[in-house]
Image: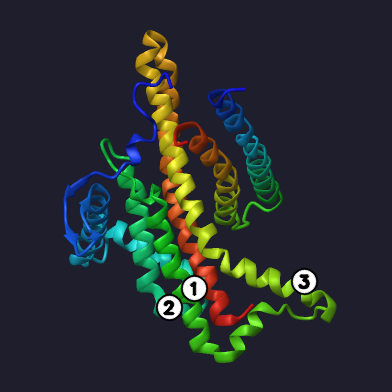
Amino acid sequence: MDLASAKMIGAGLACIALVGAGIGIGNVFAALINALARNPAAQVTPFAFLGFALAEATGLFGLAIAFLILFVF
Amino acid sequence: MALELHPLEQFKTAKLIPIHIGGIDASFTNASLFMCLAVVVASALVILGARRRDLVPGRWQSIAEVSYEFIAKMIDDNVGHEGRQYFPFLFTLFMFVLFGNLLGLTPYGYVFTGQIIVTFALAVVVFIGVTLIGIIRHGFRFLSFFVPHGVPFVLLIILVPIEVLSYFIRPFTLSIRLFANMMAGHTMLAIFGGFVAVLGIAGILPLSVDVLLIFLELLVAVLQAYVFTILSCLYLRDAIHLH
């Protein structure tokens, strides 16, 4: 296997990290909808967006690695 | 790569005014330019907004007041009353990161928060400052921060190293979170932008993806500035209240 195809495969594998981010963001907003449906006066939206940002960041670590593999090395 | 423009080209620093002091390259780059711009825009927004102190605020005054109250409430909620004396630093940090992110989204803009060294320097300043505050406030008792309460002694042998590690890893996670968000977002914009001209009439598809991505990036830009500041607040709370 030559280096170029190995890079492509590696970048694709690094993108698997985004599965976790997808599950995490889905969980965060599912919980937010649950909370707001049970108690519409609940002041939880800022926490939900904090959780969204933290969950998204973990997936982006993987995406950043994929970009680095593709474009830097 | 088939793309005409390299997607990471946008992160390259260009020397605008070369300055060499001793053996150190202290050139004024486009990153420095946009840092100065962020400082100027943020200062102008707050200073001009607070100049006319009307009872019923106008548009400019509202922006200044809303951003002030936003950070003041964040500190009150997360740190408590003792945190008020650190308001100037946290407000400056928030505005600097926010305008760094937003100016990066302007056409021909340069996103200096997409440079790991910039975010790492910011995170290290927060980390060292917070640690010093904890040591000055609590002295030797600050070390009890690393020992969880009500845990059997055998477990402490495992837990204390984990607590110490998770404390010292903070500046890295704090900086990489902001850097990776800005870097990945801008690279994604550039990649989809690279498809537009290549695909001809079908280029309308990546173009519309780019338009939607810009909205996501605006959200992320504000959100990551918020996250960076609120995490600094939480670290500050740990240092002041020790769990």
Q: Residue at x 21, y 47 (%)?
A: B15
In the image, what residue type sits under mark 2? Arg
Colour option used: rainbow
Identify which residue, B57 or B174, lies in the foreground: B174
Position of residue B113 measured from the top left corner of the image (x, y, whole percent): 38, 51
Q: Residues within 10 Å of mark 3 (few under 14, many from 20)?
A: few
- Quadrant assignment for the C terminus of chain B: bottom right
Position of residue B151 measured from the top left corner of the image (x, y, whole percent): 81, 78
Quarter-of-image position of residue B217: top left
- Quadrant assignment for the N terminus of chain B: top left
Asked if marks 2 and 3 fall on the same chain, the answer is: yes
Of the residues under marks 2 and 3, which one precedes in the sequence? Answer: 2
User: What's the distance in space between the residues labelled 1 and 2, CA to CA?
Assistant: 7 Å
Disc 2 element: helix
Per the rendering, the mark at residue B158 is 3
Q: Which residue is mark 2?
A: B84
User: What's the distance in space between the residues labelled 2 and 3, CA to CA?
Assistant: 36 Å
Quarter-of-image position of residue B66: bottom left
Q: Which residue is mark 1?
A: B76
Position of residue A1 measured from the top left corner of the image (x, y, whole percent): 62, 22
